[in-house]
Image: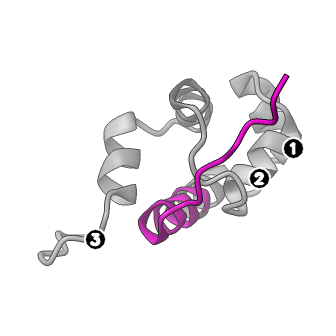
Amino acid sequence: MGAMVRTPLTPEERERGERLGRLLREARGDRSMPEIAARAGVSAETLRKIETGRAPTPAFFTVAALATALGLSMDDLVGRCAPESGAEAAA
């Protein structure tokens, strides 16, 4: 079994991961990581990595489950984590 080679992240991916992490962290508010992780069916460690930007490209279903657990829509997440466009719509 060969080791899995990870391609280096692009600055865009890293930036998007940090934005996603911030957004999830804000949405979680004062609820605990284990509570939200359990509700989403992921480990608290996975949630911690995503929130801190150490897992900047989480699996789609992980993000979808976390969004649901936090009461966010995927549209919200995509809209707020997409690369900055020149026209910053109303925040």
- For label 1, the residue is 45
Could you tell me which quadrant the C terminus lies in?
bottom left
Classify mark 2: helix, strand or loop: helix
Q: Position of residue 72 (x, y in %)?
A: 47, 39
Q: Position of residue 25 (x, y in %)?
A: 65, 58
Whether the residues at callouts 1 and 2 have beta carbons within 8 Å, the answer is: yes
The answer to if 7 sits in the magenta stretch is yes
Classify mark 3: helix, strand or loop: loop
| 23 to 45, vertically: above or below | below
| 37 to 20, vertically: above or below | above
**Disc number for residue 85:** none
Q: Is residue 10 left or right of residue 35?
A: left
Could you tell me which quadrant the N terminus lies in?
top right
- For label 3, the residue is 84
Q: Position of residue 71 (x, y in %)?
A: 52, 35
The amino acid sitting under disc 1 is: Glu
Q: CA distance from mark 1 to mark 2?
A: 6 Å
Magenta residues (range) = 1-21
Whether the residues at callouts 1 and 3 have beta carbons within 8 Å, the answer is: no
Looking at marks 2 and 3 on the same chain, the residue that comes earlier in the sequence is marked by 2
The residue lying at 14 percent from left, 78 percent from top is: 86
The residue closer to the viewer here, 1 or 39, is 1
- For label 2, the residue is 49
Looking at marks 1 and 3 on the same chain, the residue that comes earlier in the sequence is marked by 1
Q: Position of residue 67 (x, y in %)?
A: 53, 36
